[in-house]
Image (tube, rainbow, N blue to C red):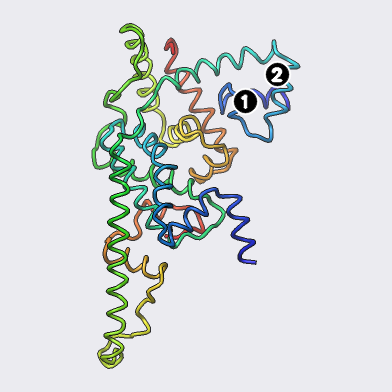
Amino acid sequence: MAVEKREAVSDEDPDADLLRRMGEGDETASRELVGRKLARVHALASRMLGNDGDAEEVAQEALLRSWRQAAGWKPGRARFDTWLHRVVLNLCYDRLRRRREVPFAEPPDRIDPAPSADQRMAQDQTMRRVRAALATLPDRQREAIMLQTYQELSNTETAAVLGISVEALESLLSRARRGLRFLLQGAEP
Amino acid sequence: MTPERFADLAGAYGADPDRWPAAEREEAVSLLRARPEQLRGLLELEAALDAALASWTVSGPGAALAGRVMAGLSRGRSARRRWRVFLSGLGAALTLAGGVAAGIGVLALPQAGDQATSALYSLTVLGEPVDEADEAAPDGQAR
């Protein structure tokens, strides 16, 4: 019965087996965790904090906490990835509170290379406007956009991270997108 | 699938049906094929916002970060092993010394298993076992 339950949970949570192996001290599992999660965790923290150095520290702390949790992780209704995204968001908010700055106040650290200076400037301008527009959204709307649009979580995964129903998530996303469209009127990609 | 629900989906998830709930995707695409004039303009509006949002790119983690994370995990593993050895030694010593007489409940000491060791390790060595971030975990998860 316990084995069947574990297999069923493994089907639902792709990280369940990885966590079990980490909890058993499997070092390759730790390396696999870093390979699977580091870039995504870093991307969320980078957008939330607008600072590469802080994003790297948050990413490192989040993965260390993952390792600590692994031994006692109990497969349940929620996925590990859901928990991890919530930890990253909370760590980011901790930093922002300590910093006492407006989120996204800093310019982007890097922009994608473009063939011409004009294109780079246009891209930079759009990016700044998007960052500024997102910064004006209420926290919950911004989180919904971050998770669904940039982290590419499904609607059920995003709703789980936020602790709300899918219907409530759709309402959040709709209001967020309406607000963004209004603020970005005239911005060209 | 109604045009109103189609509009709700586009308004929430954007213009790309691949980002829409899987259970409704096929019906939505069928409706779009059946009523392109009515629905395409709506999608174009959402696509413009999608493109603007997509302009915000961030660089991946620096090459050294993965190494630093692994080094941190490795230090944690080493510390946990030393802690487990310490606990085992402490348990044995107390048993020999007559733990009950010394006022320490030997039975109260954790066993040197992974789960209990991790919990006690976190409480004492790492110093921050349960904090706001961990407490925010979804129901049913280890704290």
Residue positioned most to the front:
A28
Residue B61 in the image: above or below residue B123: above
Please report the residue visible at 41 percent of the width from the left and 68 percent of the height from the top: B114
Residue B60 in the image: above or below residue B94: above
Secondary structure beneath disc 2? helix
Residue A179 in the image: above or below residue B38: below
In the rendered image, which residue does mark 2 sit on? B32
Task: Give percent across and percent down for residue A26.
Answer: 42, 58
Residue A177 horizontal side relative to residue B83, left or right: right
Q: Judge the density around disc 2: few (<14), some (14-19), many (≥20) Cα neighbours within 10 Å.
A: some
Secondary structure beneath disc 1? helix
Residue positioned most to the right:
B34
The quarter of the displayed image where residue A137 is located? top left
Which label number is shown at residue A148?
none
Task: Give percent across and percent down for residue A189.
Answer: 44, 13
Please report the residue visible at 70 percent of the width from the left and 22 percent of the height from the top: B3
Task: Give percent across and percent down for residue B140.
Answer: 51, 59
In the rendered image, which residue does mark 1 sit on? B17
Amino acid found under the numbered disc labelled 2:
Leu
Disc 1 or 2, which lies upstream in sequence? 1
Task: Give percent across and percent down for residue A42.
Answer: 36, 37
